[in-house]
Image (spheres, helix red, strand yellow):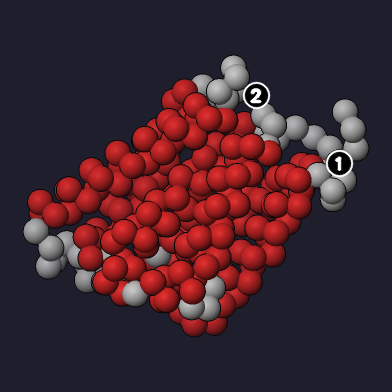
Amino acid sequence: MKQATLKQPVMIVNLIIVILEIIAFIHDCTVFGLSLFKWYTVDSNLLQLVVSALVVYFCLKNKPLPAGVTLLHFISAVGLTITFLIAAFVLAPEGGIHYYFIENVAPINHLIGPALSVVSLLFLEKVKKQPLPIIIWPAIVSLVYGIICLVLNALNILEGPYFFLEIRTQPVGTIVLWFAIIAVLCLVLSFVYYRVKWRKQ
């Protein structure tokens, strides 16, 4: 196996991701403090920061990526894709494209981060084919996040951060519908990413 170098595309892309995600995290910490962790978008980007740092580490050590890193990357890539889709088709039409895709670090959180994450996962990281059940994990993690937020909303500890999580003000049908939409999106995206990544196997 050839020695890993900084010229390898997987190294370049993931170093860029690490740098951009650190910039976004510092900005979000400055603006929102510890409350930044309530957003699914921020959590997905932070997970991607960890994943990309691990990818860089194993490349530098010239070691194959563990299955656990690939699993985490599936979760972060699907999560980031969900953030892009919801920002583009649900939040931006109401809150404005400028706020969700242009202002401050929004391009990193909602567009650049998701795009680079998916490119690295599907086309750059060479790993053995994983069992098909890997595709259920992004949906599980997303639903766990949603359930935690619902409980915190019910206890009046948290408000939102998304309208369909406001259990004290939203109809049950709206909450169930959005949970179903996000779960199905996670499963569909995971399956598509799985087939694309291992299409020759």
Residue 4 quadrant? top right
Q: Is residue 133 above or below residue 9?
A: above
Residue under the point 17% across and 48% down = 177
Q: Residue at x 17, y 62 (%)?
A: 167
Residue at (49%, 82%) from the top-left corner? 31
Q: Residue furthest top?
A: 201
Q: Secondary structure at mark 2?
A: loop
Amino acid type at image mark 1: Ala
x%, y% of residue 107?
Answer: 52, 68
Whether residue 32 is visible here, answered yes or no, is yes
Q: Earlier in the sequence, mark 1 or mark 2?
A: 1
- Could you tell me how far apart the alpha carbons at marks 1 and 2 are, in whole angstroms? 18 Å
Quick one: which residue is furthest to the right in this view? Answer: 3
Give the vertical position of 36 relative to 143 (above or below). below
Among the 4 quarters of the image, the one containing residue 30: bottom right
Q: Position of residue 159 (x, y in %)?
A: 26, 71
Specify whether 138 is left or right of 165.
right
Estimate how packed mark 2 is, as few (under 14), some (14 to 19) or many (20 or more) residues with alpha carbons within 10 Å. few
Q: For the N terminus, which image quadrant?
A: top right
Label annotation for residue 15:
none
Q: At which x and y percent is residue 200?
A: 60, 19
Question: In the image, what residue occupies the spot 62% across and 49% down?
Answer: 51
Please, is residue 124 above or below residue 93 in the view? Answer: above
Q: Residue furthest bottom?
A: 31
Question: What's the amino acid at mark 2?
Answer: Lys
Can you tell which quarter of the image residue 187 is in? top left
SS at badge 1:
loop
Report the disc number at residue 128. Answer: 2
Q: Which mark is residue 4?
A: 1
